[in-house]
Amino acid sequence: MNKVSGQSKTIQNPKSKIRNQPIGIFDSGVGGLTVYRALHAHLPNEHFIYLGDTARVPYGTKSLATVERYAIENSQFLASRGIKLLVVACNTASALALPRIRENIGIETIGVIGPGARKAVSITREKNENPNIGVIATEATVSSNAYAKAIKRASEKAEVVQTACPLFVPLAEEGWTKEAETFSIAKKYLQKIVEANVNALVLGCTHYPILRDVIQKTVGENVTLIDSGEATAEEVFQLLDEKNLANETLPKRASERRLCDDLDHFYVTDAAERFARVAERFLGAKPAKLEAVEVFGIDKLKDN
């Protein structure tokens, strides 16, 4: 009896083991680092595995079938690393591939579009029963109407104005956040948003928070900017609590926890050095653990 009793004390609670597992994040490239930053800030007890599919970026020019395949391959790679929850930081993949991802990996999965849309409606309801919400994103995300549909699901009365800002991506990656040229481009892109007199503006691309100051000054201080990454981090916090998946144990060196430290692991499918440079520009630090990997499944060149 004593032996059995002693053995029972060593049996670990499976739920406890799951709580200690990392959260996976994937994006088509570097933009998802702003989502990682938001998650890191909201969930200091958690650690993260990030995959940037830099070999196949951008996703916005690809077909639905191709985006789904890329997204599933990325998700399966992260699932193989023992994650407890998956965050799809890529707006294109969030718009087109979430159902297929969930079918294929069987892990709690959250995208960035739903949280951003719900946050915009929640904020604007306090100001207006018939909220007027702007969305800026890449051409592919705007064309998909994913944000407009998600906003309408949250509020049938909401009016939605969308515009694409494709040059914001390279400007963010180059760190052009204060240049006169950036303000000039922003003024041209956001003219439609300004004329629509929106209550809130959703930053519907993960790169755009890097240009937050430029965007805010262009649309005016009366417009509330909605960072989809921040909104996603808030919903992940709630989801972990609801599913009893939150890590209750502080990580080692908790007092020294910082962005890109060695508790978080970063993977890329190409151009690791460039990724590290942009990460430092976005986050103020290079990843301590950065590794190039291949996640491709059937996406390979075939001999004729």
Image (cartoon, rainbow, N blue to C red):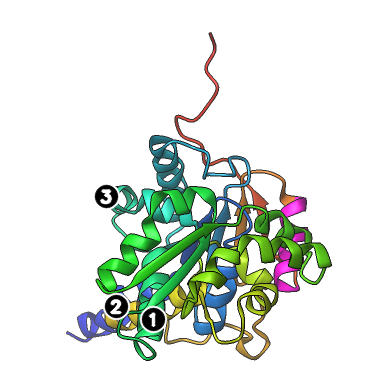
Q: Residue furthest right?
A: 179
Question: Mark 1: few, some, or many residues within 10 Å (few <14, many ≥20)?
Answer: many
Most frequent secondary structure within the magenta stretch? helix
Between residue 179 and residue 40, name the one nearer to us: 179
Identify the residue under disc 1. Answer: 246
Q: Using the rendered view, name the quadrant where residue 178 is placed.
A: bottom right
**Quick check: 194 left or right of 108?**
right
What is the number of the mark on residue 13?
Answer: 2
Evaluate whether residue 233 shows in this view.
yes
Q: Which residues are magenta?
A: 273-284
Please name which of the two marks, 1 or 3, marks the residue nearer to the observer: 3
Q: Where is residue 159 shown, x and y percent of the image?
A: 35, 70
Q: Secondary structure at mark 2?
A: loop
Q: Is residue 2 above or below residue 98?
A: below
Q: Amino acid at mark 1?
A: Ala
**Quick check: 216 left or right of 249?**
right
Identify the residue under disc 3. Answer: 103
Please name which of the two marks, 1 or 2, marks the residue nearer to the observer: 1
Q: Residue furthest front?
A: 195
Q: Secondary structure at mark 1?
A: loop
Q: Is residue 281 above or below residue 120?
A: above
Q: Is residue 38 above or below residue 162?
A: below
